[in-house]
Image (tube, helix red, strand yellow):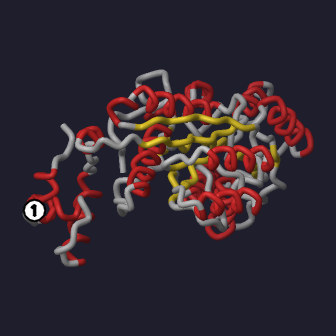
Amino acid sequence: MRPTVHDIAAAAGVSLATVDRVLNLRPGVRSATREKVEQAIERIGYIRDVAAANLAKSRVYPFTFILPSGDNSFMRGLETEIRAAMRRSAVERTAISLVTVPPFDVEALERALDDARATRPAGLAVVAVDSPIVAAAVGRLHRDGIPAITLVSDLSVSTRDHFAGIDNSAAGRTAGSLMGRFLGTRPGPVVVLAGSMLVRDHRDRLAGFRAVLEADFPGRTILPVLEGHDDPAEAERLVTGAFVGHPDIAGIYSLGAGNRGLIAALKMRRTEAPVCVIAHELTAHTRSALKDGLIDAVLNQDAGHEVRSAIRVLKAKADGQAVLSAQERIRIDIFLKDNLPFDDAAPAPEGDDI
């Protein structure tokens, strides 16, 4: 059963009226009390009933989501979640448009942002390429009073209103800690397979990964980053070439997509010395590789939570309301072969885990 406002009041030790004032951002609550209520919301995992709140309004919210095209499994999973939100439009009073652009194409993304701005949506969510051109396009949305949030990958400098995604620096640090512990004293360098250094989430993960290995596991060499552009064939070619040039590779950190190519390269060398492999996103491919022992750990983010969070934040911004940060924090899950969900699909919990 989902937590209720009664549970919040009990956990915070306040009245229902106080909880109501905090949830509806009304005055008359001391800052210390407001903080107690927000901490209780985070602790018990309260999720506001969006449908009930919207039934009390007559407004329909036109939102635009912009995603990269291609066969990136995680992005296609994100698209599936957006289309599920489209099917809930009648209940949630949204009118969602979905636009796809070629991955890592700055000019195409700029055009898509400007085209969307011309339609005057109530808000926009975009998987960003970290470029001044994209940041400027987001700035034009801000100038026109259109709330814009980045989804999955953020911008370094921009006027975006919110970021819906995991802490990618923390994800990289987690991967570095796992890699260092799994390898122990086993000699050999580590390879990093990225999609592109044009996107901030990949840069942040790499920085976190490097920082932990250098601080906690000194002496471990990290080879130059391989950029596979989330293309399985390119990723397979790059990883295979890395093994040829460095047959003593001890570990691989795949911090983007292209995992099908990585898995194909690993299958070709099953008879060689084992390699510690850490990847991102639990898809059908990475799940199977976990079961087969080709991948040791997968760091996962809940695409469904990110889409639902984006919609909640865009509604709050469109209404001039504050965002409940505790509700919108996206969790990093760590999967090993020993704790995989029973369902063969990537995990999609009913509620938004905080």
Give residue 298's position: percent from left, percent from top.
Answer: 56, 40
Give residue 58's position: percent from left, percent from top.
Answer: 30, 41
Q: Quadrant of residue 272?
A: top right
Whether residue 346 is visible:
yes
Count of all numbered marks drawn on residues in the image: 1
- Residue appearing at x 54%, y 56% in the figure: 146
Extreme residue toward the right, this view: 245
| Rendered-image quadrant of the N terminus | top left
- Residue appearing at x 71%, y 62% in the figure: 136
Choose between 281 and 5: the one closer to the eye: 5
Q: Amino acid at mark 1?
A: Ala
Q: Residues within 10 Å of mark 1 (few under 14, many from 20)?
A: few
Q: Quadrant of residue 203?
A: bottom right
211 in relation to 130, above or below: below
Q: Is residue 186 left or right of residue 320?
A: right
Q: Quadrant of residue 212?
A: bottom right
The secondary structure type at the circle numbered 1 is helix
- Residue appearing at x 80%, y 41% in the figure: 228
Extreme residue toward the top, this view: 344
Give residue 239's position: percent from left, percent from top.
Answer: 82, 38
Choose between 5 and 242: the one closer to the eye: 5
Residue at the disc numbered 1: 17
Give residue 182's position: percent from left, percent from top.
Answer: 60, 49
Whether residue 325 is visible:
no
Choose between 213 and 153: the one closer to the eye: 153
146 in relation to 249, above or below: below
- Residue appearing at x 54%, y 60% in the figure: 170
